[in-house]
Image (cartoon, coloured by chain):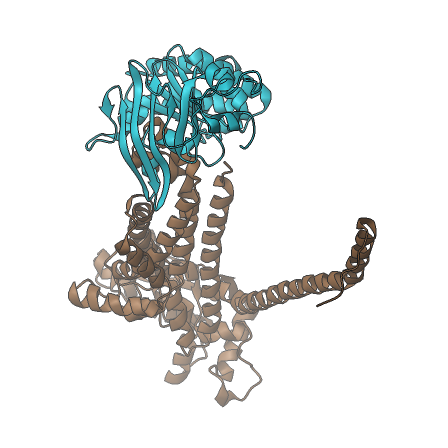
Amino acid sequence: MNKPQEALSPSSQGVRTHAIVKAGLARRRSAEIRFRAYGLVCIVLGLAFLLMLFGNIISHAATAFQQTYVALDVTYDESVLDPEGKHDAEALAAADYPALLKRSLQALFPDVAGRQEKRALYGLLSSGAAFEAQKRLQANPGLLGKTERLWLPADDDVDMMVKGQIDRNSDEGDRRLKDYQIAWLDKLKADGRLEKHFNTRFFTSGDSREPELAGIWGALMGSLLTLLVVGALSLPMGIATAVYLEEFAPQNRWTDIIEVNINNLAAVPSIVFGLLGLAVFINFFGLPRSSPLVGGLVLTLMTLPVIIIAGRSALKSVPPSIREAALGVGASQMQTVFHHVLPLAMPGMLTGAIIGMARALGESAPLLMIGMVAFIVDIPGGLSDPASVLPVQIYLWADSSERGFVERTSAAILVLLAFLIVMNGLAVYLRKRYERRW
Amino acid sequence: MRNPEKNPAPASFAQEPNKTVGDIYVANPRIECRGVNVFYGQKHAIMDASLDVGRNEVVALIGPSGCGKSTFLRCLNRMNDTIAGCRVSGEIKLDGQDIYAGGVDVVPLRAQVGMVFQKPNPFPKSIFENVAYGPRIHGLAASKAELEEIVESSLRRAGLWDEVKDYLHHPGTGLSGGQQQRLCIARTIAVSPEVILMDEPCSALDPIATAKIEQLIDDLREHYTIAIVTHSMQQAARVSQRTAYFHLGRVIEVGDTAQIFTNPRHQLTEDYITGRFG
């Protein structure tokens, strides 16, 4: 721009500048307001999606926390359970408990005849109901010969009927429950023998083929054990590596290569770690398949780069004046790091570690590769027992065809989300509490 | 101040910067430096510096910004080792022992030659822990009572005891700037050094705190040898017995403080103290 320079006096130049600034002011203000509006819109959209997601999950999961129970008067008839009068615990364990329940049902509906109809009647109860009676007797052997009212879990079809998932007005051929079964249920309800109670089984039992008997405790234990392995291995190794790389390692080509590799590993897709685990831990070392030990090892490999990177950045943030002060008093490099630098960097390191572990908790792809996709009924007791983890359990249930599993999948998702929120909340709390200002 | 009209420069007034003038050497020195060169990578920061620091005296290192005073000071307790790419050559002897010889352990060296930094940097621990840390890691106290005694005497010598004796377990970072710097001095003397290096200790402090610390330096002279880098010529004049003037990485002139400030023997020294640059 070649405007001829006018010889302006300083004050008139100031006035002219002021006029130019004022002219552009409206445009700048409106740009700022627009920018803030965009930001607000983004936040609102994000929150709306989050609410939609949570609302969806919660609305599906709400019914899973209730389970339909049927009240039956069960007589612990000695002639059925212990015909030879042995009073042997082993014999009692092998006795015919379903027979007791069938008798109670027959007492309630004496008109039912014919094999198919009888089978339909007994089918109103869950296949695990007999086991409940057995457990009661084992806990209280004095009940032998007496009668008591037991609340027994109903079959998942009954459960779905009671929760309104099965439309009683639809064509009988399309339904899982026949009309006469529904009539029986109505009678039970009228007698006050059909109720929904809190589904404690969901939190105390392992997986099952039957939705009404299925629980996430097995998967939760598996997740906890796996996380235990991950924590025990990746925390010390990760922190030690970060300290060494940041404080003690010489600055040369090798350490640069190591740094690049660690940064890359943090971005590798998790299923690759699963393949590595399959090839090395299971095939080469022969560790038990589908165990929390192998799962933990695979997830440790995945979490280590994250912890190392977070640890290094926490160490870098400790001001050099602290190090100089310690060195100036005559502390060795080791003493400076462990007495001064590490305690100050620890909150940042722990936050990074917790976030890394929360990520490991939600991983399913690498665990599928090492075999955690099996149907595991028992609660894992140790590191080498076969186990499943929460995300895999959710996947298996989502894949399943029973109607009862739909709500349970959402409930399991809620449990996993609760776990993750707790872990991330812990990380935030730690960070706030131990944040230092030097 | 020398008046150039009444008192013209002597004919021997040095002009060339490559040769240090004045009383570089003293008898029975605590620290001897001969031909010290320091490189930061390619940059030649200190060129052929030679200087003696005598026992129980305060030597001030003065000079314009960037002339290498702090670099030279940090050589004396090998703090430059922590800077990547820094190379030191030449001879620096503490009580006759070369501190850059192979096999010299820097840990006890830094206990013998302590350092106080420009910005007060107490540890984020309690006042007691700040002072006790040094004696503890060097094993100077056999028992808890002895440790407490060392802490108390160090704080007394630093002139801080009366102000903090009831707050020993409060964090050191909660003190004022001047108190923090005195805490750092107490921390340094707690390990019983022979020499205390001070790198512009008062530049971050207000005048009252500065006066207190200057008084403290004078009291400390009784027991310790002190080398102080200072930006303020007035402070150098108040506090030191000998002064060394640095200019662009070289030691230009060394001598008695009174003589340097009234009758400098080098043109560059005169230009600096008269304020022609700086």
Left or right side of A297 for A48: right
Instruction: Please state the total of marks drawn on the protein image.
Output: 0
* Residue A333 occupies quadrant: top left
Q: Which chain is cyan?
A: B
- Asked if residue B180 is positioned above or below residue A189 in the image, the reply reads above
Residue at 49% across, 41% down: A435
Residue at 31% across, 18% down: B30
- Frontmost residue, B134 versus A70: B134
- Asked if residue B84 is positioned above or below residue A138 in the image, the reply reads above
- Frontmost residue, A242 versus B255: B255
Please identify which colour was used for chain A in the image: brown
- Frontmost residue, A216 versus B273: B273
* Residue B228 occupies quadrant: top left
- Asked if residue B122 is positioned above or below residue A421 in the image, the reply reads above
Quick check: can you spot residue A109? no
Left or right side of B182 for A90: left
* Residue A398 occupies quadrant: bottom left
Q: Position of residue A195 (x, y in %)?
A: 52, 65
Quick check: can you spot residue A430? yes
In the current view of this chain or complex, which residue is farthest to the front? B11
Left or right side of A227 for A121: right
Q: Position of residue A260 (x, y in %)?
A: 33, 60
Q: Position of residue B235 (x, y in %)?
A: 52, 20
Residue at 45% across, 64% down: A412
The N terminus of chain B is located in which quarter? top right
Q: Position of residue A83 (x, y in %)?
A: 24, 64
Residue at 29% across, 22% down: B32
